[in-house]
Image: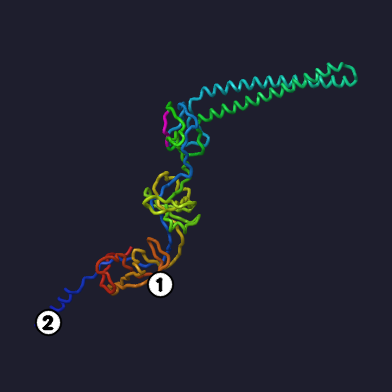
Amino acid sequence: MVVLVVLIGIVMLVRATRPKPVQVSVKAVTRGTVERTVSNTRAGTVKACRWAKLSPSAGGQIYNLPIKEGDAVKAGQLLLELWNDDLKAQLLLVQREMAAARNRSRAACLKSEAARRSAERLVALRKKDVVPEDRTENAVAEATALEAECRAGQTEVSVLEAKVALTQANIERTRLLAPFDGVIAQINNKLYEFVTPSPVGIPTPPAVEIIDNSCFYVTAPIDEVDASEIRDQMPARITMDAFRDRHFDGRVRRIADFVLDLEKQARTVDVEVAFNRSEDLKDLLAGYSADIEVILDARQDVVRVPTEAVMEGKKVYVYLPDRHKLSLRTIRAGLSNWDWTEVIDGLTPGDWVVTNTDAPGIQDGAAAERMAEAP
């Protein structure tokens, strides 16, 4: 009886002094795709491919403003017109002067043609000694003078045509037309207000801003170290805070030609990524914050492990479910990103790796219990 009590006490003492199993979070080693990517260092921005900030080249009072913010407009459509009745009146005056000059020129040219024919007849008769020489000379001189008058009239018409073109150009300076199909983003002036061109070196707000909402891209800064590996047309993924559950396929469309050096910030290179699918553009707005992930390389159907499980020195803790213990292993890794790391050697699909590697008590050979089933 005493022996039994002693044995029970020993068993209870061993159990009491045995370390409790470490609670571990595990994920399975699988097969799949692993990519090597680079991402932006600061938030990027969705931009319209065309965004024009427009103001009339002349100053004056806004007389016609047929648009409002949010309107869809076509290329060449009138957006704004300044008061220009004086220029229109001037154009009408010059056009009428030009019409009168054309009539005078036509009359002079008709007289010139008649005088030339008459002079040619007299010259022929003079050769036969039928008419006096002085009469012939006077006829030739008159014909020559009328030809000069005809040319002067034609020149006057050309001058007035130039004045018409100049007046029309001045009228066009008072009119603001849409340079492309788009949407009115902002109007900074109201009807009957006065607008003036920006003085040299002093920018003023544009009268109208128009954006092309049929084409968008993302521009984002990439660290100069990573940017050296990016090439035009590389595939990329775009994510936006406005669409948290969506990823947009894209492609690198431009890499800046210089490194941006901002005070107290890392040196970066702006990279532009275009959207691959036109259907992705319908819900976009210029100005959305966005992030890009450029895919430098990709491997298909490889053994992979969650990157969060890989420690310094390419070591991972493997959970042995049949023994409820941990085993420290060194792997040979290939491509890696924030989510997955390719395993060339050291693990096989179906192994379980520990992801909470910084938890107290985790070490090689430690007893462990799985916290929950791996997803």
Question: Element type at marker 1?
Answer: strand
Does residue 35 show up magenta in the picture?
no
Instruction: Say which residue appears at 63% left-offset and 26% top-offset.
Output: 161
Is there any visible trace of residue 114 in the rendered image? no
Which residue is nearer to you in this view: 311 or 145? Answer: 145
Give the magenta range: 186-190
On the picture, is 288 further left or further right than 128?
Answer: left
Does residue 187 show up magenta in the picture?
yes
Instruction: Locate residue 93, reporting x and y percent.
Output: 58, 20
Could you give the CA–CA distance between mark 2 and mark 1, rounded to whole angstroms?
A: 52 Å
Instruction: Locate residue 187, reporting x and y percent.
Output: 42, 34
Question: Element type at marker 2?
Answer: helix
Which residue is nearer to you in this view: 280 or 361? Answer: 361
First in sequence: mark 2 or mark 1? 2
Instruction: Locate residue 16, reporting x and y percent.
Output: 16, 73
Question: Residue tagged by mark 1?
Answer: 345
- Compared to 95, does 276 lie above or below? below
On the picture, is 19 further left or further right than 351?
Answer: left
On the picture, is 358 further left or further right than 51?
Answer: left
Instruction: Locate residue 79, reporting x and y percent.
Output: 48, 32
Is there any visible trace of residue 222 in the rendered image? yes
Position of the C terminus, as image quadrant, is: bottom left
Q: Which mark is residue 4?
A: 2
- Report the amino acid beneath label 2: Leu
Residue 67, picture quadrant: top left
Which residue is nearer to you in this view: 92 or 148? Answer: 148
Position of the N terminus, as image quadrant, is: bottom left
Instruction: Say which residue appears at 87% left-offset and 16% top-offset.
Output: 131
